[in-house]
């Protein structure tokens, strides 16, 4: 047995103060710095940061500790894969060129420990999110992002953070069992099409469902719950970091 381990994590929303999540950066660093030497990959399934817009000459100071932690992980030989979420959709070349992170702007299909896996943050999956799906195309348009970056960071970042926090609060208020079930339904479709594992995030509701057709994982949130998942030799588990 190789005993190789992969971590999955999402929805930390670093950069915004949240009651009950004041130490989430430190706990994130503890999780990764104390990970055994058999950790091979870290998959970030979106919304690691509450708002990320990449200016050419400016990086937010309150992101430094997390970025240094990820750089240290890469330097140890761990492959870090970052899927964009709805709060960190404007991922640019800095993370790839300076930190060594693999960036994916949409979904990702990959073999993980022998399992055909589909990974996606999960924003826009709900049927009633038609308006958001239109907004998503506007926000992710490179021209629109370039225009936004004309704002000085002292203006652009607070404005973006304000609207980013508003959207997260909206999701938290409207999450229901029907939404959770709709995510399960989407996962089933991918599993029935031939995938062994489907990984979503976004809902902040962590769960691990084992269907006849395969496994569905929602990574929950690191924001307050400190959820993450690990896979070792093909066996996956949803975990909670003990603080």
Image (spheres, rainbow, N blue to C red):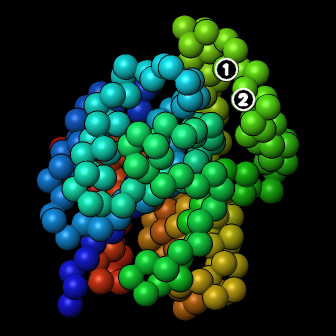
State left or right for residue 11 relative to residue 73: right
Residue occupying image coordinates x 74% and y 55%:
126
Asked if residue 55 is positioned above or below residue 239 in the image, the reply reads above
Q: Looking at the image, which is closer to me, 174 or 208?
A: 208
Residue occupying image coordinates x 79% and y 31%:
143
Q: Is residue 172 visible?
A: no
Give residue 17's quadrant in the image.
top left
Helix, strand or loop at label 1? It is loop
The circle on residue 117 is: none
Residue occupying image coordinates x 55% and y 62%:
200
Q: Looking at the image, which is closer to me, 189 or 138?
A: 138
Q: Is residue 66 visible?
A: yes
- CB atoms at circles 2 and 1 under 8 Å apart? yes
Helix, strand or loop at label 2? It is helix
Give residue 120's quadrant in the image.
bottom right
- 10 Å crowding of disc 1: few (<14), some (14-19), many (20+): some
Disc 2 to disc 1, C-alpha distance = 6 Å
- 10 Å crowding of disc 2: few (<14), some (14-19), many (20+): some
How many labels sit on residues?
2
Asked if residue 111 is positioned above or below residue 138 in the image, the reply reads below
| Image coords of residue 13 (percent x, y) | 46, 36
Quadrant containing the C terminus is top left
Quadrant containing the N terminus is bottom left
Q: Residue furthest front?
A: 97
| Image coords of residue 221 (percent x, y) | 43, 48
| Image coords of residue 20 (percent x, y) | 32, 31
| Image coords of residue 28 (percent x, y) | 27, 43
The circle on residue 149 is: 1
Residue occupying image coordinates x 30% and y 83%:
233
Give residue 90's quadrant in the image.
top right
The circle on residue 145 is: 2
């Amino acid at each position: 047995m190789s005993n190789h381990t992969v971590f999955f994590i999402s929805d930390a929303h670093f950069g915004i103060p949240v009651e009950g999540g004041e130490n989430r950066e430190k706990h994130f660093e503890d999780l990764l710095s104390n990970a055994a030497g058999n950790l091979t990959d870290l998959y970030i399934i979106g919304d690691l940061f509450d708002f990320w817009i990449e200016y050419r000459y400016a990086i937010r100071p309150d992101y430094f500790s997390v970025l240094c932690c990820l750089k240290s992980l890469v330097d140890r030989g761990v492959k870090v894969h970052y899927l964009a979420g709805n709060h960190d959709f404007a991922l640019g070349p800095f993370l790839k060129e300076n930190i060594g992170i693999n960036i994916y702007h949409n979904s990702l299909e990959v073999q993980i420990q022998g399992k055909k896996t589909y990974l996606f943050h999960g924003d826009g999956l709900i049927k009633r999110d038609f308006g958001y799906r239109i907004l998503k195309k506007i926000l992710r348009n490179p021209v629109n992002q370039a225009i936004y970056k004309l704002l000085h960071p002292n203006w652009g970042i607070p404005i973006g953070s304000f609207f980013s926090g508003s959207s997260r609060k909206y999701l938290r208020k409207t999450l229901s069992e029907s939404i959770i079930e709709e995510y399960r339904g989407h996962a089933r479709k991918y599993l029935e099409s031939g995938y062994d594992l489907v990984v979503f995030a976004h809902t902040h509701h962590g769960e691990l469902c084992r269907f006849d057709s395969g496994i569905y994982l929602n990574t929950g949130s690191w924001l307050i719950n400190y959820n993450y998942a690990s896979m070792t030799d093909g066996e996956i588990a949803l975990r909670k970091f003990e603080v």
